[in-house]
Image (cartoon, helix red, strand yellow):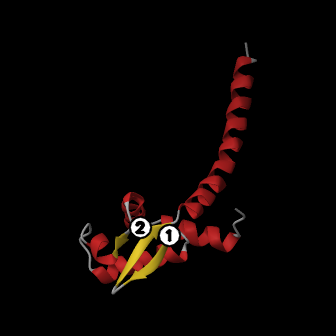
């Protein structure tokens, strides 16, 4: 999946907030309505809805109508894209640490 810079920016913005990360964990278990999600927080439904809007803009959730409710679903593809972006840099650190290890071993 090719992700453009604006998309990754909105994804990381959505992931930056601990409340939104907690919402994602809960949606990892099952799809939920705004009311169900609001029960787990000491904030209004309107505040939860604002967090859900940021998550939706970040591509981390999708929303579908179900009668009078809106059901929120985790979208793991964007999480995978963010993880891949971060993992790119783990190779950088692996190389640096291997070079440091080699340098220390060669000091003898």
Q: Earlier in the sequence, mark 2 or mark 1?
A: 1
Q: Quadrant of the C terminus?
A: top right
Q: Quadrant of the N terminus?
A: bottom right
Residue for point 54% across, 61% down? 76
Residue for point 69% across, 50% down? 88
The residue beneath circle 2 is: 20
Residue for point 29% across, 80% down? 45
The image's mark for residue 47 is: none
Q: Position of residue 106 (x, y in %)?
A: 76, 18
Give the CA separation, mark 2 to mark 1: 7 Å
Q: Position of residue 105 (x, y in %)?
A: 71, 18
Label 1 element class: helix
Q: Is residue 59 left or right of residue 22?
A: right
The residue beneath circle 1 is: 14
Residue sticking out furthest to the top:
108
Q: Is residue 11 left or right of residue 108?
A: left
**Looking at the image, how many numbered discs can be counted on the residues?**
2
Label 2 element class: helix
Residue for point 34% across, 75% down? 33
Question: Relative to 70, is 28 above or below?
Answer: above
Q: Nearer the viewer, residue 20 or 95?
A: 20
> Residue 68 falls in which quadrant of the image?
bottom left
Q: Position of residue 16 (x, y in %)?
A: 48, 65
Q: Residues within 10 Å of mark 2 (few under 14, many from 20)?
A: many
Q: Position of residue 35 (x, y in %)?
A: 28, 76
Residue sticking out furthest to the bottom:
68
The answer to whether mark 2 and mark 1 are in CB contact below 8 A is yes
Q: Residues within 10 Å of mark 1 (few under 14, many from 20)?
A: many
> Residue 99 falls in which quadrant of the image?
top right
């Amino acid at each position: 999946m090719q992700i453009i810079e604006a998309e990754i920016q909105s994804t990381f913005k959505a992931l930056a907030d601990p409340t939104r990360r907690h919402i994602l964990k809960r949606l990892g278990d099952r799809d939920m309505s705004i009311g169900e999600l609001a029960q787990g927080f000491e904030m209004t439904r309107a505040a939860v809805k604002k967090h859900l809007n940021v998550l939706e803009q970040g591509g981390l959730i999708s929303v579908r109508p179900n009668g009078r409710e809106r059901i929120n679903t985790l979208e793991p593809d964007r999480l995978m894209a963010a993880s891949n972006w971060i993992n790119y840099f783990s190779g950088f650190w692996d190389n640096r640490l291997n070079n440091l290890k080699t340098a220390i071993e060669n000091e003898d």
